[in-house]
Image (cartoon, helix red, strand yellow):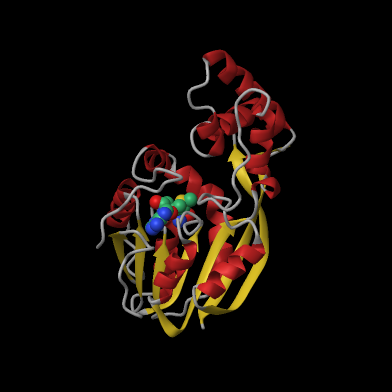
Amino acid sequence: MSGAAVSPSLDWNGDNGRRWVENQDRLDRMLAAYGEALARVAAPAVGDHVLDVGCGAGATTFDMAARVGSSGRVVGLDISAPLIGRALDLAAERTAKTDGAVEFRLADAALAEFAPDFDRIVSRFGVMFFDDPVAAFANLRRALKPDGRLVFVCWRGAAENDWTRLPMSAIRHLASVPPPDPEAPGPFSFGDRERVRRILERAGYADIDIRPFDSPVPFGAGDTADAALDDAVDHAIRVGPLERALRGVSETVRAQALAAVRLAFAGKLRPDGVWIDGAAWIVSARPA
Ligand SMILES: C[S@@+](CC[C@H](N)C(=O)[O-])C[C@H]1O[C@@H](n2cnc3c(N)ncnc32)[C@H](O)[C@@H]1O
C-alpha cells in the first residue's frame, strides 16, 4: 500500500474528501445512472477480478462485488483516507452473502504496484485527476490480465454539463470564475474525446471505444417546488465547483450568488424535483 499524496487540483484528503463523505448518500444517488451505464459496458462475469479506481466510498465496488459473486474478487482503490474510511464502514454494514470478496486499498492509482491480476478495471469518475495521465494509465495497464478490459465513465466538458454550466454562468458576474484549463487535472479534464484517446494509446491501450452517455442528474427534491429548489441550491454550495468558486466571498455576494443560482435551477424543475442534464463519456479499452 503506497502513501496517499494530496491531489494538486482537489484535496481528496482534506476538505474535498470530507465533503464527499458528508454528502456520500446523495452523491451516490446523483451518480447512480452513470454507475449503471458503466456496469453495463464493463459487464464483469461471475468469478471475475475487478479493480475499481478512485472508488470513493465504494458504491461501484459494491455493485461490482454483487455482479462477480462469491467466486469473484473486487478491490476498491482510492487516494483519499476519509473516503476509504467511509467505504470500510459501509462494507462492515453490508450483509449480502452473495458478494465477491471486497477489499479497499488506500493508494495513489498512478503509483500503486499491481500484479496482472484483473479482468476489469472500472472507474466511476475517478480517473480524471492524475497529474500525468499517460503514466497513470500505463501503471494501471499492469494490473490487467492480457484479455482484461479498462472501462470508465468520465464527464464530458463543463460546457456540456448543465449541472455545472448553469450555476457557474449564473454567478460569473459576482465571483471570479476563471475558465477551467480543459487539460488540468479535474472533473472535466477528459472532456475532449481525442485527448482521452491519445492518452490511452500512449499508455499502451488498443480497441479504444469512447461513446457519449447522457443522463439527468437528480439535484434537488422536496414536497413543493420551492423546497426542491432550496434543496438543489443547498446541495450545489456544499460540494463541487460552485462551492469552490464561492469560498471567501462576502455574505452579501454569497446571498446574491445563491439567488442567481436558484433562478437558473428554476428552469430545470420537474414534478419530481430538480433534474439537471449531465453528459459523460463511457470509455473502454484493452491492453495493446
Ligand atoms: C469524483 S470522486 C468519485 C468517487 C467514486 N468513484 C464515486 O463514483 O462515488 C473521485 C475519486 O477519485 C479519487 N482519486 C483522485 N485521484 C486519485 C488517485 N491518483 N488515485 C486513486 N484515487 C484517486 C478521489 O479520492 C475520489 O474518491
* Residue under the point 61% across and 69% down: 197
Considering only vertical position in the picture, is 206 above or below 79?
Answer: below
The image quarter containing residue 92 is bottom left
* Residue under the point 31% across and 78% down: 115
* Residue under the point 38% across and 63% down: 110
* Residue under the point 35% across and 61% down: 77
Q: Nearer the viewer, residue 275 or 284?
A: 284
Q: Nearer the viewer, residue 51 or 156?
A: 156
Q: Which image quarter has ligand 1?
A: bottom left
Residue 179: % across, % down:
63, 40
Q: Looking at the figure, which quarter contains the N terminus?
A: bottom left
Asked if residue 210 lies left or right of residue 202, the reply is right
- Judged from this view, the residue extending furthest toward the bottom is 146
Q: Is residue 272 visible?
A: no
Residue 84: % across, % down:
32, 53
Asked if residue 268 lies left or right of residue 181, the reply is right
Q: Is residue 107 visible?
A: yes
> Total marks drawn?
0
Considering only vertical position in the picture, is 21 above or below 117?
Answer: above
